[in-house]
Amino acid sequence: MHQQREPLSETVSIGSSSGGSLWGVVLAGGEGMRLRALARRICGDDRPKQYVPLLEERTLLRQTLDRIALGIPPSRTAVITLRSHAGYFVQAMGGLRDSHVLVQPADRGTAAAILLSAHWVAAHDADAIAAIFPSDHFVLGETTFMAHIARIAAWVAEHPETVVLLGAQATAPETEYGWIELGKPLGSDGDQRIWEVRRFWEKPSEDKARICFEAGCLWNTFVLVGKAAALLRMGEATIPAVSDRLAHLRPFLGTEDEVWAMHQAYALMPKVTSPRRFSNPAQPASPSRVSRT
């Protein structure tokens, strides 16, 4: 059994007067290849790691959804998955009915999933702020974490052209993680500090990882907080081919033609394998910022 958690009143809604309500998005379409052997040992099949109960009875996906629910109601939460994950997904979601599910017919990369979710959020609330979470994180101090998300969302409401990426304090020169090299500091609010992003280092060599660690670079959590409109502008500037196809899909979201339209949008869509192409801070459309957590 897992502990019952109390929701955080400060994160339930930012309110339209201060820049739009906060919506949650869970990216659950990854294949999780690095833990495939462990998944097979625990579950007896080759399911992606987000559908595996690694440290307790709940899967990592269910832990993520329960964590988000501390601050964002399920009615304002969407889960992005793949049609090939259907069997695992239904099992992992057991009992959760209010969260919306967006089923991609094929894997076109993380950027496509983010833009799809941004269109969905913007269609429901044009002024919304979206908090985007990977589905395979294990987080201690969940209440503190979601309170931090709320503070970042409040900062984004005051800086609507920016997208904030959460970085974690590194404890070792890991080569399997992405790293964020910090740029100019933009200020702080209590224990919350925000910088510009100078550069991303994805799974660096041992030497480069050591340099990143010693230089105070942060681990990239790929938790993003930004206006849905800012995310869409970022997509238009960095991956226009993907952005254009998803823009044509948007009128069909939530209708009886959604499945057909999704197949049409994804059929000829290029796959963006590197998230950096989507979140390049050098692009002027929506400057990236990083907050340490």
Image: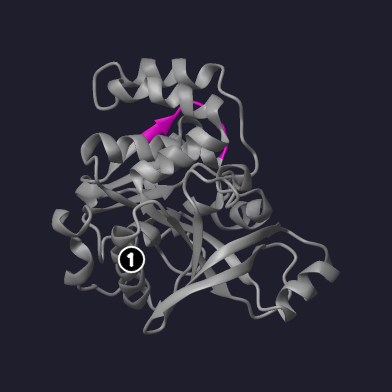
103 falls in the magenta region: yes
Q: In the image, is 272 to the left or to the right of 189?
A: right
Q: Is residue 162 above or below residue 108?
A: below
Instruction: Residue 201: tell me if it is visible.
Output: yes
Q: Residue at x 58, y 62 (%)?
A: 197
The image position of residue 237, as x and y in percent, is 53, 36
Residue at numbered disc 1? 155
Tell me the element at label 1: helix
Span colored in magenta: 102-109
Q: Residue at x 66, y 59 (%)?
A: 199
Amino acid type at image mark 1: Trp
The image position of residue 282, as x and y in percent, is 60, 50
Q: Residue at x 65, y 51 (%)?
A: 36
The image position of residue 158, as x and y in percent, is 30, 61
Mark 1 Cα-neighbour bin, 10 Å: few <14, some 14–19, many ≥20: some
Asked which quadrant contains residue 146, the reply is bottom left
Q: Nearer the viewer, residue 76 or 201?
A: 201
112 falls in the magenta region: no
User: What color scheme is it?
Assistant: one colour
Instruction: Residue 293: tell me if it is visible.
Output: no
Classified by dominant secondary structure, the portion drawn in magenta counts as loop
Q: In the image, is 61 to the left or to the right of 77?
A: right
Q: Quadrant of the N terminus?
A: bottom left
Q: Is residue 32 above or below residue 272?
A: below
